[in-house]
Amino acid sequence: MVKFLQRTYVYLIFAFLYAPIAVLIVLSFNASRSRGTWGGFTLQWYVELFQDRVIMSSLYTTLLIGITSAVIATVIGTAAAIGIHNSRGWQKKLVMNITYIPVLNPEIVTGISLMILFVFSKVQFGYLTLLLAHITFNIPYVILSVLPKLRQLKNNLYEAALDLGAEPWYAFWRVILPEIMPGVITGLLLAFTLSIDDFVVSFFTTGSGVSTLSITVYSMARRGINPKLNALSTIMFTAVLLLLLIVNLRQAREEKKGRRDNEQEKGFRIIGTVDAAGVDSEWVQSQ
Amino acid sequence: MTDQQLVNLIGVSKVYDGTAALKGIDLYIRRNEFLTLLGPSGCGKTTTLRLIGGFEQPTTGRILFEGTDVTGVPPYKRRVNTVFQRYALFSHMNVFENIAFGLRIKKMDEKSIRAKVGKMLELVGLAGYEKRSVDSLSGGQQQRVAIARALVNEPEVLLLDEPLAALDLKLRKEMQHELKNMQKQLGITFLFVTHDQEEALSMSDTIAVMKDGEIQQIGTPEDIYNEPKNAFVAGFIGESNIVDGIMHQDKLVEFAGQFFDCVDGGFAPQEPVDVVIRPEDIKLVAPEEAKLQGIVRSVTFIGVHYEMIVEAAGIDWLVHSTLMEPPGAEVGLYVTPMDIHIMKKVAAG
Amino acid sequence: MTRSKAMLPYVVWMALFIVVPLFLVVYYAFTHTSFNGAELTFANFQRVFQPIYLKVLARSLKLAVISTVICLLLGYPVALVMAGNAFSRKSTIMLLFVIPMWMNFLLRTYAWLTLLERNGALNQLLTRIGLPALNILYTDYAVVLGMVYNFLPFMILPIYSVLSKIDQGVIEAASDLGANKFVVFMRVILPLSLPGVVSGITMVFMPALTTFVISRLLGGGQYTLVGNLIEQQFLVVGDWGFGSAISMVMIILILISMAVMSFFEKSEEGATLW
């Protein structure tokens, strides 16, 4: 009985979380323009969506910025994590604290401060500023994904490689990088997702003519309901679902390979924000 | 040429953040020798090993390899290989690739790699495990892979950093035998680090006992056990009764309020000394037959013999004996002069 | 250690794009630029404390606190149930909380626009089952609803992750020592879960306080929340000095609330000692 009540409660919360999405999905196939009535099944909104030049070009911008910023942030962030892992004392503390600034800082402050910087340094607003801004807020998440993997590395792994005759770069490529790869990939995916999901920072750092999907959605939604947005939501939701499915399957496979990890953390590792939240609270307490 | 010095440490010291981990040690390792660095944690034994492996550079002093100075040469250019305490196996590679790692760096052809790795797996008793993931192996098996991975490179010296510490007692005993056999069979010099005195005694040709970054004594296991140079070595190698004494003249020592004959000499008159007596060297006799009389305080049966605490002259003596006296019994404690070891006092610390 | 040099590019990057911009915000907040150049001023901060802007601040704080409390009340039981044994495939079910989180934030908010509309799905449903229609779009209720909807998973996940790590032995020990379920919860589970609660509150309160999207889309008005105020200063009015000053005040508010929370957490922990 208690279990039944507990489950019912959780299902209600799920209903709350998923009902709006479900409604959007249903409406995306609704031929009637008015939300209230069902006017029959149609794919008209999807056709219109793909013919909408503004949406398509902002989709392209979003993906372009998402991929480039994620890749660059992953390279810089992985190197940074290795550096942080191998540094000591005040240097480590200082760099870690700087790492938490963009994580803890309200997005709007990150946005306006970067905007001021770009105006101040007379950089043309557009792709470049957008990319720089996205890399900036992405790197810390890469670091926070890679650092735990570095900490989990067995003792003396790097030294064992050197001992067997590997020069430092060879040891890095052939031993250290493969061992921390799961963290690097998590960081890359997290950076990509954060980038395509971002609105606030992009809003302040983009220039005229360059618009991400989020910005386009914002300006369309401000003008009211638009059935094309329903279609877009449906596609985005499906894409996220697939992405998470792939990531989780990959992790499940990795676990089968004999990697011992905390059972409860299984579903969590991809959710970097949760890890970051855990770290946040530690960080806040240490202040 | 069996006495040839393969590795030489000359006045080597190492300071970490202002703390001296090694205080200018001199040590040589002979070819084909099984040398053990023995001491409590923090004594500098692992630091010594890491200096020879090239993972650290000495603060002062030089390290010679067959007479050539290798100070400053990075680990990947040294002809030594290491078995790490936690094995440090590459978990993204299978057993075969772990062992082949060093050979691949040397760009050896695939056929020779197969042959060599196969031979090594046979040697460590893991034939047929080539494709296994290292994380699926037991601790003992991982240990063997680590040894094979190091040995396949045919190092001049194999460095082993407490390699058996993570194994359970039974497995540890087994591996002790196997390691010793491998060393004899392959004729490779072993430098072994441990804090376990039994392990050191049963495996080594030579033992260097270390404490606080200094070598206390170097010698064969027999020398070190029978003729410990000071109370620390005596206490560390096996259990001992260590009491304060005064050397009145050569071969005459006073402790526990009595004068005893002994076999040591060369001390200043009235010099305070440490008197070391092994528990198995104390014989229980009738009270009137010995200079020291005491009362049995406790008796524990530990398999081969009884371990007894006997209080005599205000001191608790640890006695190992195959004969049991009940607690409360009055006994005499007798020690032959041969078994009374006199040692210079070492500075406290 | 030469490997520590690998963080050099990162350090330069962060100095350039995080530290310098923050200093610029401080610089603009404290200066007044005229034809004579820049001069030090506190006028921007004085303006923040004018009643009209204080009202905005108070309103933002109020809505953020309400949303946070609702998230906590709704989310804690979920985390508790999830950490218990009501579900067998926990990681799959936890994933269900994550999926909406990864869908575009703008689209999630937009979804409520469709739902809450005068002729929207919600009202259709209400009238069909004979209930009066609800017109809460463009009110504070809609804003709070939007915040709760968007940020609820941020409350559930950290609390769940702390709760699920509590050693079952501790709970059994407490029951063994004679504590009933309520006492076990109050004296053992709740105190142990506080770190999760604190990070959950932080993760909900911060974005709720600073959002300008939810208020703009679901609240309608222009000066509803402090986030909108900042946005307006930078993108419409062009008064960077004032915008920077409000941003600084907001950051200070956040820092204070964090400090209060960590203090609260510590004193709670202390209280359980006796």
Image (cartoon, rainbow, N blue to C red):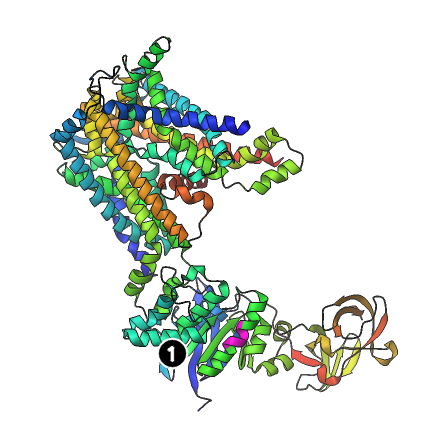
Side (left or right) of B111 relative to C70: left
Give the residue furthest to the front.
Answer: A40
Instruction: Mark yes or no: residue C76 visible.
Output: yes
Q: Which residue is mark 1?
A: B154
Residue at the location (25% across, 22% down)? Answer: A27
Instruction: Mark yes or no: residue C238 visible.
Output: no
Q: Could you say where residue A11 lies in the image, as x and y percent from the top left?
A: 43, 27
A258, B339: nearer the viewer: A258
Q: Could you say where residue C252 lies in the image, as x and y percent from the top left?
A: 36, 30
Vertical side of B332 occupied by C87: above or below: above
Residue neighbourhood size for the residue with mark 1, other residues' Cα within 10 Å, grouped as few (<14), some (14–19), many (≥20): some
Which span of residues is magenta-colored?
A: B175-179
Residue at the location (29% across, 61% down)? Answer: A173
Q: Could you say where residue A28 lies in the image, as x and y percent from the top left?
A: 23, 24
Give the residue furthest to the right.
Answer: B288
Q: Could you say where residue A85 lies in the image, as x and y percent from the top left?
A: 37, 54
Side (left or right) of B136 relative to B256: left
- Where the C terminus of chain C falls, by quadrant? top right
Residue at the location (36% across, 25% down)? Answer: C149
B219, C155: nearer the viewer: C155
Q: Amino acid at mark 1?
A: Glu
- Element at label 1: loop
Q: Mark 1 falls within which chain? A: B
- Where the N terminus of chain C falls, by quadrant? bottom left
Vertical side of A254 occupied by C201: above or below: above
Q: Is residue B3 magenta?
A: no
B341, B155: nearer the viewer: B155
Side (left or right) of C153 relative to A123: right
